[in-house]
Amino acid sequence: PAQTAAPRPAARPAQAGPAAPAAEAQSDPAKVAAAELILKKTIAAMQSGTPNYGDMTSDLAEKVRAQAGNVLPMFEQLGALQSVTHVTTQDGAELFSVIFANAPTQWIIAQNTQGKIVALLFRPAPAPGA
């Protein structure tokens, strides 16, 4: 029988140097689940126009407030949330593929030991094959 395992994209960075082992840290299922939950909550809050600042560290909340005028209108253009898929854990943060009705995106989220969001970034997903 032929093997039909899907290829594992970016499982190993090409000659990433000494930092590669840390970058490929094993994903902790509990941390991934917690990050996915808070990410979905954060996206819903952003879509409603009222970011969940209480779930963020004060430093991050301040940065999000400063950018809210530019960022929040983008959520209207993205459309409805369709799926959230964990991609990898890197440098203590979780990378998710988040698909909206009108655009695929990538999100990076990191939480501190109290569960507060310390890092939150999103960007358009790279084009297939890029």
Image (cartoon, grey):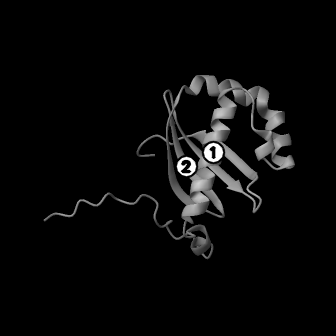
Residue at 52% in and 71% down: 15
On screen, 115 above or below 107?
A: below
The dot on residue 24 is none
x then y, percent, for residue 13:
51, 65
Residue at 58% in and 70% down: 25
Depth order, front residue of 111/128: 111
User: With 108 as the anchor, is 51 left or right in this view?
Assistant: right
Residue at 77% in and 59% down: 114
The dot on residue 96 is 2
Mark 1: amino acid: Leu
On screen, 28 above or below 87?
A: below
Task: Determine contact: label 2, label 1, CB under 8 Å.
Answer: yes
* Tag 2 secondary structure: strand
User: With 65 as the anchor, is 72 left or right in this view?
Assistant: left
Return the residue at label 1: 39
Mark 2 → mark 1, Cα distance in angstroms: 9 Å
Residue 113, image quadrant: bottom right
* Tag 1 secondary structure: helix
On screen, 81 above or below 21?
A: above
x then y, percent, for residue 39:
63, 45
x then y, percent, for residue 60:
81, 46
Q: How many marks?
A: 2
Mark 2: amino acid: Phe
User: With 89 as the anchor, is 110 left or right in this view?
Assistant: right
